[in-house]
Image: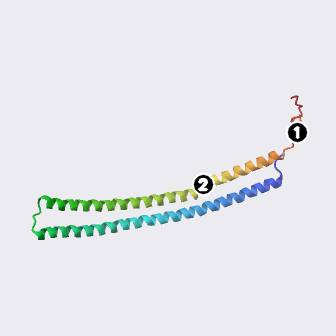
Amino acid sequence: MGADPVTVGLTLGGAAFSFYGQRQAAKAQERAERANAAYHAEQARHAEAQKRRSADIYLRQSTEFLGEQKSLIAKSGVDFTGSVLSKVISSTYAAEKEYLAILREGDMNVKLASMRADAARRNADFLGSSEYSTILTLGTLLNAGGDLAIAGARNKPSSPAGTSLSGDTYTG
């Protein structure tokens, strides 16, 4: 004897509500992931603009500093040779290295935000996919099937002590 009709109805109804709830939660998560993707894409655009702004500001400031440095040396009457030339070259090199470091850091920030946006888009695509819907459906159906099997097993008539369901007597 299987599960009684009330148990079957409640199990199937519960499975349907469970599936519906899981699907609605997946849709909400998909929307959240799409919002995250948009946010991180905006962060990437902002990081790119910030990188350019920071690099431009630094380039302007370092150019002014190096110009002032050369002007002071020229006004002092010292020749641009030896240690003076070495100092100017060293300052120029340091300014160039810092400028490139600003650009590299900005590029990393852009890449990080872009990677986060891509990951959020992939998550959203999966949550909205037919594959994910199939996974939810199969999981719900398997769970309901298991519940029905358990309910059916509980409703089996028990055999009298010492006999099997076929009527054979145990001689223990």
Is residue 58 positioned above or below 15 on the image? below
The image position of residue 106, as x and y in percent, is 36, 62
Q: Taking 125 as reference, is 114 left or right? A: left
The image position of residue 171, as x and y in percent, is 88, 28
| Disc 2: which residue | 132
Q: Give the image quarter of residue 110.
A: bottom left
Is residue 157 positioned above or below 130 on the image? above
Amino acid, disc 1: Ser
Checking the image for residue 18, the label placed there is none
Is residue 158 positioned above or below 75 on the image? above
The image position of residue 91, as x and y in percent, is 22, 62
Q: Which residue is the extreme one toward the top?
A: 171
Query: Mark 2 or mark 1: which comes first in sequence?
Result: 2
> Circle 2 — which element?
helix
Q: Residue at x 64, y 54 (%)?
A: 136
Q: Residue at x 57, y 61 (%)?
A: 30
Q: Taking 155 as reference, is 76 left or right? A: left
Residues 69 and 12: in front is 69
Structural crowding at the residue carrying mark 2, measured as other residues with C-alpha within 10 Å and reported as few (<14), some (14–19) or many (≥20): some
> Circle 1 — which element?
loop
The image position of residue 148, as x and y in percent, is 77, 49
Q: CA distance from mark 2 to mark 1?
A: 44 Å
| Disc 1: which residue | 159
Amino acid, disc 2: Tyr
Structural crowding at the residue carrying mark 1, measured as other residues with C-alpha within 10 Å and reported as few (<14), some (14–19) or many (≥20): few
Q: Residue at x 58, y 58 (%)?
A: 127
Q: Residue at x 73, y 48 (%)?
A: 146
Residues 34 and 98: in front is 98
